[in-house]
Amino acid sequence: MSNDVKENIKSQSTWKRGLYMLLYAVFYMLAEIVLAAVVIFQFLLQLFTGETNERLRKLGQSISTYAYQILVFLTFNSEYHPYPFGAWPTGEPRPARIADQTAEADD
C-alpha cells in the first residue's frame, strides 16, 4: 500500500464520520417508519373525514426534511450533522451548501 492509502486508513476523522454515518443510517430507517405511519394515518383521515390533520402535515414535513438532511450527509454532500447533533428541522429542506454555511456560522 502507498503511504497516502495508509494515512487515509489511519485517519481518525474518517472513522469518526463512518460512525456518524452508521448512526444516521439507523435514524433514517426510524424516520422512514414514522413517516410511513403519518402517511397512512393522513390517508385514513382524508378517506373517512374528508380532511387532513394540520399538525400531522407539519410533522410529516419536518420528518421529510430530516430524512433529506440525513441523506445529504450520508452521500458526502454536506458536513452538517442533523438532529440530535444539530437542530431539528423546520419547514422545507434547504440546499446542502446553505446547510453547510449555516452549520459553520453556528460554530
Image (cartoon, rainbow, N blue to C red):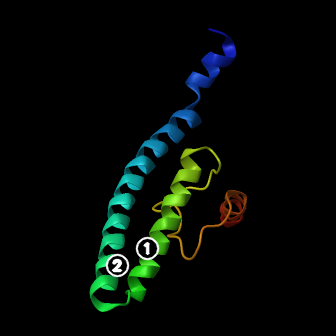
| Closer to the camera in the image, 100 or 35 | 35
| Residue 67 position within the rendered picture, expressed as x and y whole percent measured from the top left | 48, 59
| Residue 22 position within the rendered picture, expressed as x and y whole percent measured from the top left | 43, 42
User: How crowded is the residue under tag 2: few (<14 C-alpha within 10 Å), some, or many (20+)?
Assistant: some
Residue plotted at (57% across, 23% down): 9
| Residue 103 position within the rendered picture, expressed as x and y whole percent measured from the top left | 65, 61
Residue plotted at (45% across, 68% down): 63
Callout 2 amino acid: Gln
Q: Which mark is residue 42?
A: 2
Callout 1 amino acid: Gly
* Residue extending farthest top: 1
Inspect this view and state whether residue 97 appears: yes
CB of mark 1 within 8 Å of CB of mark 2? yes
Locate residue 95 relative to residue 31 in the image: left or right: right
| Closer to the camera in the image, 89 or 102 | 89
Residue plotted at (54% across, 46% down): 74
Residue plotted at (34% across, 72% down): 38
The answer to whether residue 78 is above or below residue 52 is above
User: How crowded is the residue under tag 1: few (<14 C-alpha within 10 Å), some, or many (20+)?
Assistant: many
| Residue 70 position within the rendered picture, expressed as x and y whole percent measured from the top left | 51, 54
Quadrant of the frame with the C terminus: bottom right
Q: Which mark is residue 60?
A: 1
Residue 93 placement: quadrant: bottom right
